[in-house]
Each structure stands twice: as C-alpha cells, then as structure tokens.
Image: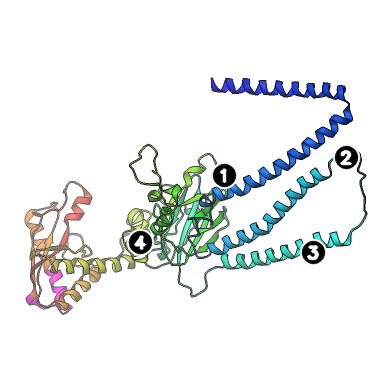
C-alpha cells in the first residue's frame, strides 16, 4: 500500500511540474521573453548561491557529525604502530584537496551568480595570462610533489618487510570461497612447506608437506589471536579467486591473489580491551548492543576487531568475517600452549603420516615437559598417585623394550635421580587377549624390564619396585583395538615421598 501511494505521489508531482512549465510559458508570452529570461536567470543565480551555502554547510556538518564513526577520528585511532602514518597521510591529503574542493565550488557557483546574463554587460575576452598560468601550474605542482614524496616515504615505511634478524611472529591466511584458513607456527616458530598438489579438502586443506618437519607443530585456529607490541608478518594467499585481507582497525589491507603470495607486516599497539575502553568514552557506543535487550551489554562491550574480505568475491562474501583478538603477551603465550598441532590431531599414525610407527622430536620434547609436570604434580599430591608412562613400548607378546622407549625412561631416570627419597612402583598391564596367567607373567616381566633399565641409568634399586597386574585393571574396553592398546601400558605409582 505504501509503495502504491509513493508511486501515485511521484506521478502527481510530475504532473504539477509540467503544469508549472506550461504556466511559465504562457506568462512569458504575455510579458515578453526577454523579461522572463532575465527574471529566470536572476532567480537561478540566487538559487545556486543558496545551494552552495547549504551544500558546503552540509559537507562540514556531516563530517563533524560522523567523525566518531570514521576510521582515524574520534575513538577510532589506529590500533597498529604504522596506522598513525597512514592516517596522517590521509589527513594531509584531505587538507590540500579540501582547499581545492571548497575553492572550486565557491568559484563555480559565484561565477554563475556574478556573470549571469545581463543585457547591459559586454563580455571581455583575453587570449593569454602568464600570471594566471603560473598560478594554476606551479602551486598545484608543488603540492603534488609534496604529497607524492610524503606518500612514498609512508609507503616505504608501511610496506617494509621483516629484517633478517628481526624478532617477529609469522602467520598465514589463505582465502577461499567463503572463509579463511589460518595457520600458525608451533614451538619451532617456523611455518612448514606447502604444495598445492597435496591439497585434500578433507585431511589436508592447505596442502602441507608432512615430510617437512616444520609442519609437525603448525596449528590452524578458528580466529586470529596476537600479542600487543609484537611485530607480525602475515603471509596472504588464495585458493580460488581474488580476495582481500582487510583489518580496518589496524590499517592493514592486502590482496590475496591465487598463485601469487603477498604479505603485510604490522605491530598491534592496542589490545581488544583497551580499544573497548576508548569506545566507552563515546556516547554513540554507550547504547545497548541489541536494541531488543535494553538491559544487555552495551555496544562498546561487545566490540571485536575483525578480519574481512574487501573484494566482492561471490555471493557468500559476507561470511568471510573472522574475529581478531589482541591480548597481552602473557595471555598470548597461554593461548599458544592450549593449541593442538593439526598434524598430531588429524594426520598422526594415519596412512597419510610418513612417520607412522616412529617417535618424532616434537613428541619427545612435548612428552618430556608433560612427564615433568605430571611428576611434579604427583609429588604435591597424596601417596598413591599414578602416572601413565605413555612412551614405554615393548615388542608384541614380549618383555623386550623397544628402542624408542629410552626417551621416556631416560627422562624418568633424571626425575627420580633428582628426588632420591621418592619410592615408586612400576606396574605392568595387558589387555584381555590370551591366557590370563600368561598375561600376568608378561606384565610382571615388562615391569621388571623397565625397572632394570632405570637401575642402569643410576636410579637406586631401593627406590624401585616392579609388579605385574595382567588384565585385571583395564582403562578402556577390551572390545576394540583402540581400547586394548590403551590397556597395554606401564604405569608409575608414587609409594612414598
């Protein structure tokens, strides 16, 4: 109904305009064309001057009104170290172009007013004016040279790559329709090699080369988390079409081009919480985030940095938004420690694992830290605390230790030698396959084999005991291969401290 009324109103307005034109034409015939043209010219000239004033007032008033909503003004100061340089360059450019904008509009409309048709005035024509040509050639040239040099200096500063020995974090963002695949390096601080030929949407979405050891600890989070004050280098790529890696609050914007890796380097200087506190000072952010919940959190409280795609890459373009969190360095380190390696979570010991059946350096180092933490925690707990020695392995159906068990037992020997007053029991366990008595005997022999190894590493025999429990204490069901594997284990029990 509203649409129909709108259409009818527009039609009626058009009819009125046509009728006014006809009335003006008849009036002209009655009073004479010359008089009517003079009045029309005068009236139009006045209207143009009114429009000029209203237009300029509108431009400045709207800029002032929306200043707190525009990047670079009000609470939206740059959240990166280089952002201030870019904002400053834009402000300088706005200053000079603003002068030209205002001056040309005043000249345009003032000349239309001053030099409107007048039968008592004769036009003056001149062919050449050196002063005028110098004025509009030299001054703009000087301004343009200044802007170009300033822009070049800023560009070189903003687009500089990381130095050879410069400390930084390097992450990777790969765009595709319609999301981002994010990749971080693990404890080694290095991103592994990729090969597009190895991309598998199900198991290897980035085409990581698993034979490259640097890929072992890389992880793929669902959001970007970065520490305040640390330089970050972002590798930017695309799987399909042109995308754009855009972090507006950090003044970061770079195309993601298929087949042509790009990068951007920036340093966050404001955490998410600090930016929220800046927004809190602005009245327009002190309103409910959801109008339907007036008692809910305010708009500034729900603010988040975001990663967006600034290219129209398809119908699902809007869904490429990802959250970005800037935190203090200590919180960042804690977050890093909670992340799981993609290889270890999805590839390890599958058919795609080139190291299947082997212990990796990453696993050895990680397990050393875990065992130390578990042992320290057990010392602080009551006697009887049990630690599962995850990396103690035996040949199938045999009490012979596999060579890769030495890492776990060597680490355990260091801990026991450092705590000579601690007495422990090594216990062997089996699954339920086979004869019960044979399983009990095998578990006893395996516990004794682990004990003998530790004694050879200098652990006092008085602090060690060994006992086999066979199949009587399963951790998981014996109905599955995974459950039986979990039940075949060697444990360490703290007897006394």
Q: Element type at marker 2?
A: loop
The CA span between labels 4 and 3 is 70 Å
Give the number of the mark in front: 4 or 1.
1
The CA span between labels 4 and 1 is 42 Å
Mark carried by residue 312: 1
Give the number of the mark in front: 2 or 3.
2
The residue that appears at 58% across and 46% down in the rendered structure is 62
Magenta span: predominant SS is helix
Is tag 1's residue or tag 3's residue first in the polypeptide sequence?
3
The residue that appears at 19% across and 55% down in the rendered structure is 486
Label 4 neighbourhood size at 10 Å, few (<14), some (14-19), many (20+)? some
The colour mode here is rainbow
Give the number of the mark in front: 1 or 3.
3
Q: What is the tally of numbered marks visible in this picture?
A: 4
Q: Element type at marker 4?
A: loop
Mark carried by residue 138: 3
Are the residues flagged by discs 2 and 1 in contact, CB closer than 8 Å? Answer: no
Q: Which residue is mark 4?
A: 355
Label 1 neighbourhood size at 10 Å, few (<14), some (14-19), many (20+)? few
Q: Which residue is mark 2?
A: 118
Q: Element type at marker 1?
A: loop
Give the number of the mark in front: 2 or 1.
2
Give the number of the mark in front: 2 or 4.
2
Image-based side of 183 in relation to 356, left or right: right
**Magenta residues, start to end:** 448-462
The image shows residue 92 at horizontal and vertical percentages of 63, 61
The CA span between labels 1 and 3 is 41 Å
Is tag 4's residue or tag 3's residue first in the polypeptide sequence?
3
Give the number of the mark in front: 4 or 3.
3
């Amino acid at each position: 109904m509203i649409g129909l009324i709108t259409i009818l109103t527009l039609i009626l307005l058009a009819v009125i305009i046509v009728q006014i034109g006809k009335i003006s034409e008849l009036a002209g015939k009655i009073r004479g064309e010359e008089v009517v043209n003079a009045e029309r010219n005068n009236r139009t000239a006045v209207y143009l001057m009114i429009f000029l004033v209203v237009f300029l007032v509108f431009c400045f008033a709207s800029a002032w009104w929306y200043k707190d909503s525009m990047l670079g003004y009000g609470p939206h100061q740059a959240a990166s170290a280089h952002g201030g340089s870019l904002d400053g360059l834009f402000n300088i450019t706005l200053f000079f172009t603003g002068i030209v904008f205002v001056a040309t509009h005043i000249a345009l409309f003032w000349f239309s007013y001053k030099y409107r048709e007048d039968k008592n005035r004769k036009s003056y024509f001149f062919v050449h004016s050196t002063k005028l040509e110098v004025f509009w050639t030299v001054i703009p040239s000087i301004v343009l040279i200044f802007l170009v040099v300033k822009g070049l200096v800023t560009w070189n500063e903003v687009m500089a790559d990381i130095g050879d020995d410069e400390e930084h974090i390097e992450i990777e963002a790969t765009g595709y329709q319609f999301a981002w695949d994010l990749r971080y390096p693990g404890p080694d601080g290095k991103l592994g090699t990729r090969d597009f030929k190895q991309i598998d949407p199900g198991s290897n979405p980035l085409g990581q080369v698993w034979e490259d050891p640097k890929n072992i600890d890389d992880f793929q989070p669902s959001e970007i988390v970065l520490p305040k004050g640390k330089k970050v280098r972002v590798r930017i790529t695309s799987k399909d079409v042109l995308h754009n890696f855009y972090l507006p609050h950090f003044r970061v914007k770079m195309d993601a081009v298929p087949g042509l890796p790009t990068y951007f380097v920036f340093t966050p200087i404001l955490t998410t919480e600090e930016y929220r506190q800046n927004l809190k000072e602005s009245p327009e952010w002190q309103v409910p985030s959801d109008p339907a919940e007036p008692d809910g959190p305010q708009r500034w409280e729900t603010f988040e940095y975001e990663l967006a795609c600034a290219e129209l890459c398809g119908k699902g373009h809007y869904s490429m938004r990802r959250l970005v969190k800037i935190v203090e360095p200590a919180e960042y380190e804690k977050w890093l420690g909670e992340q799981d390696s993609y290889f270890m979570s999805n590839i390890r010991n599958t058919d795609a694992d080139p190291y299947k059946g082997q212990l990796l350096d990453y696993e050895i180092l990680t397990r050393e830290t875990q065992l130390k933490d578990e042992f320290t925690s057990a010392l602080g707990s009551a006697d009887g605390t049990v630690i599962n020695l995850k990396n103690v392995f035996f040949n199938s159906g045999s009490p012979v230790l596999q060579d890769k068990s030495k890492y776990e037992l060597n680490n355990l020997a260091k801990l026991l030698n450092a705590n000579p007053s601690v007495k422990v029991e090594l216990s062997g366990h089996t699954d339920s396959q086979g004869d019960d008595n044979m399983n009990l005997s095998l578990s006893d022999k395996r516990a004794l084999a682990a004990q003998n190894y530790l004694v050879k590493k200098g652990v006092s025999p008085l602090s060690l005991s060994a006992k086999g429990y066979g199949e009587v204490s399963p951790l998981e069901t014996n109905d599955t291969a995974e459950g039986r594997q979990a039940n075949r284990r060697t444990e360490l029990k703290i007897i006394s401290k």
